[in-house]
Image (cartoon, rainbow, N blue to C red):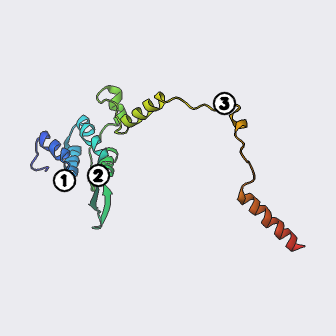
Amino acid sequence: MLQIQPDKDIVVEFIKNEDHKYVRVLGAFYLRLTGTVADVYQYLEPLYNDYRKIRRKLSDGKFTLTHVDEFIDELLTKDYSCDTALPRIQKRWVLEASGTLEPRRSALEDDFEEEEDKEDEQPMDVDEPNSREKHDHYRGRSPTRERDRDRKHERHHRAM
């Protein structure tokens, strides 16, 4: 791909290809090598939600099993990937502070907000102070403590 030098649009289509995970990973790796910092974060971060398994060949010739999201994390956080030195990129928080990138929004954030809304709408169950007196609960010793006490008692009497 480095010899062909495809347009950014083609590389983005590689990354958006959900049918072929290796095409997607190849596009991500190429974009990480050649893309701008904003493009790298914009197009690679959504791949954190791709949990499919991929095989990677190690430098000793053996294969290891990893996941697409782990590979993307390596591209965004490490200096080397696939025995290739990656260009340095600025940290995400620096780009957020300068206004280049919007704050990252988790895929689960919408679910958390929905759950919070549901909890806010439901009335809280508050125990009345006298409600414990109404319920006659037996609070005895736990069976394990009684068993331990009995064992100690038996050992003590055997030793005598």
Residue 42: quadrant of the picture: top left
Closer to the observer: label 3 or label 2?
3
Closer to the observer: label 1 or label 3?
3
Mark 1 and mark 2: Cα distance apart in space: 11 Å
Mark 1 and mark 3: Cα distance apart in space: 59 Å
Closer to the observer: label 1 or label 2?
1
Q: Amino acid at mark 3?
A: Glu
Q: Amino acid at mark 1?
A: His
Mark 3 and mark 2: Cα distance apart in space: 52 Å
Q: Is residue 31 above or below residue 145?
A: above
Q: Amino acid at mark 2?
A: Val
Residue 158: quadrant of the picture: bottom right
Q: Identify the mark at residue 2; answer none if there is no mark.
A: none
Q: Compare marks 1 and 2 and give the one earlier in the sequence.
A: 1
Residue for badge 3 = 128
Q: Residue at x 87, y 70 (%)?
A: 157
Q: Compare marks 1 and 3 and give the one earlier in the sequence.
A: 1
Residue 34, given in percent of the width and then of the height, sits at 19, 43
In the image: residue 114, left or right of residue 87 = right
Q: Identify the mark at residue 68; answer none if there is no mark.
A: 2
Q: Identify the mark at residue 20; answer none if there is no mark.
A: 1
